[in-house]
Amino acid sequence: MTDLLAEGERGAEVWRSDDWPGITAHVLDPARDLDVLHEWVTRPHAGFWGLDGLTRDELRETYEFVQTLPTHRAYLVRVAGEPAALVQLYHAQDDPVATAYDARPGDVGVHFFRGAEVAPWRVLGPAMLAFAFAPPAVERLVAEPDVRNRAAVARTAASGFELAGEVVFDSAYGRKEAVLAFCTRERAEQVFGAASAAASPPR
């Protein structure tokens, strides 16, 4: 692992849940995972990700470019071997979102995309938080769902993030109006504990 992001070869498993056996995180392989990825991001509700207009080759090239950035990483979360979610993590201080708030060392930006309902969100959500906080240097997670994406905003809040109001900044896809949200390590650990007590491991 680097200070803030898990590192590995394409497709490599870089994290495994201790609380919910069967949940793992793998470095995204833009070529081998392309079928799954393209099917997910071209769904009608996925338009807020800004990738629905890309061809398969353009999508692969986009994530191959992401892999060249030292500050951004993409991962595929699996449940019992089945693709479940796409997770994008990035150094918040080195991203356009940093212009919208007072970014701190130890802040990691997060984008979670649930692609398949192979585990309930009460399990998958806390597991993805645990993965993002796996590097000890990570102190706080920062999320910025599109203000129009009410489902994502609600899911962010339900995952333990504290909503901090609306912001506007220039993203890679143009001007973005978002809801800023934060989750500290302490708050996340409370979410982990509550979720472990309430949910059974996925089968």
Image (spheres, rainbow, N blue to C red):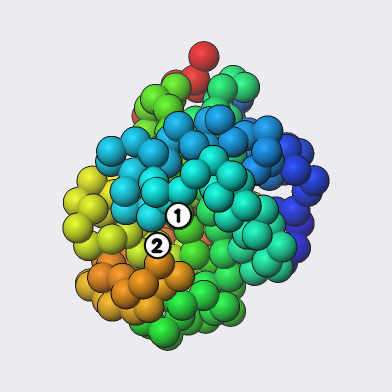
Residue at 53% x, 53% y is 88
User: What type is the residue that disc 2 sits on?
Assistant: Ala
Rendered view: 99 above or below 51? below
Circle number at residue 143: 2
**Residue 101: % across, % down:** 38, 82
- Decide if residue 12 is on the left or right side of residue 76: right
**Residue 148: % across, % down:** 19, 58
In three-dimensional space, the C-alpha distance between marks 2 and 1, rounded to whole angstroms, equals: 7 Å
Residue at 56% x, 30% y is 35
The quadrant of the picture occupied by the N terminus is: bottom right
| Residue with the mark numbered 1 | 111
User: What type is the residue that disc 1 sits on?
Assistant: His
- Decide if residue 2 is on the left or right side of residue 83: right
Name the foreground residue: 111 vs 63. 63
Q: Quick one: which residue is furthest to the top in this view?
A: 203
- Element type at mark 2: strand
Name the foreground residue: 11 vs 153. 11
CB under 8 Å between callouts 2 and 1?
Answer: yes
Name the foreground residue: 65 vs 193. 65
How crowded pointer 1 is (Cα within 10 Å; few <14, some 14-19, many 20+) is rated as: some
